[in-house]
Amino acid sequence: MARIAPLAPPYEADVEQALRKWMPPGVAREPLALFRLLQRHPELASRMRVLGAGLLAHGELPALDREIVIARVTARSGCGYEWGVHAAVFAPVVGLTPEQLEATVSGDSGHPVWSERHSSLIRAVDELHDTATVSGETWAALAEHFPAPLLLELLVLAGWYRTIANVANAVALEEEPWAVPYPGS
């Protein structure tokens, strides 16, 4: 059970409206537990939604690259909640294979499922996770594939999903029932 329970229906009108903004149009599912949790602090939630939606729906990183970064950040953070949501919703759409998903949890940047470009993303996420920086060698490898604006977006994306992982893990948010089960959980 979560340390801070996500809101449950019936929602007050302003909460219902805010939750609708978090969910993509036409989605029949109940709003994510994460969104219902954040709505306990509406001011914070409204500020977070802008950045989260901006990175997810309006970012310039190719969608596959974005999802590799998200999967690796959440895997390295041990965040089964967010890893499972993205594995269920976004991975199939962007072409992230089951083998690649598994490698975000149990592999390293040298795993054979990764191209040179994707291997550089995995190394960068690992270095950010371990040291809060990126080595010169990894930066040079990234720069071969990404211009400066996308490098900045990559850094913010990794930090954003580390924040989401911190929140979900610290409150012990239960995995969504329809999410892909986190390997080993």
Image: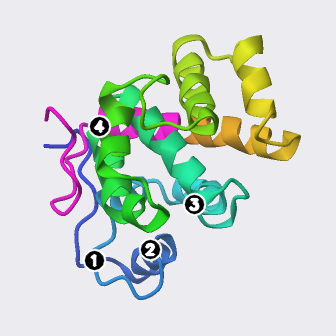
Badge 4 marks a residue whose secondary structure is loop
Question: Which label belongs to residue 23?
Answer: 2
User: Pointer 2 and pointer 4: residues touching (CB < 8 Å)?
Assistant: no
Distance, label 1 to label 4, CA atoms, is 22 Å
**Front residue of this view, candidates 5 and 139:** 139
User: Pointer 1 and pointer 2: residues touching (CB < 8 Å)?
Assistant: yes
* Residue 60 percent coordinates (x, y): 73, 58
* Precedes in sequence: disc 1 or disc 2: 2
Question: Which label belongs to residue 59?
Answer: none
Badge 1 marks a residue whose secondary structure is loop
* Precedes in sequence: disc 3 or disc 1: 1
* Magenta residue span: 161-185
User: Pointer 3 and pointer 1: residues touching (CB < 8 Å)?
Assistant: no
Question: Which label belongs to residue 171?
Answer: 4
Q: Is residue 56 above or below residue 131?
A: below
Quarter occupied by the N terminus: top left
Please say whether residue 170 is visible from this viewpoint: no
Residue under pointer 1: 29
* Precedes in sequence: disc 3 or disc 4: 3
Q: Is residue 156 above or below residue 55?
A: above
Distance, label 2 to label 4, CA atoms, is 21 Å
Question: Which label belongs to residue 49?
Answer: 3
Identify the residue at image location x=56%, y=38%: 115
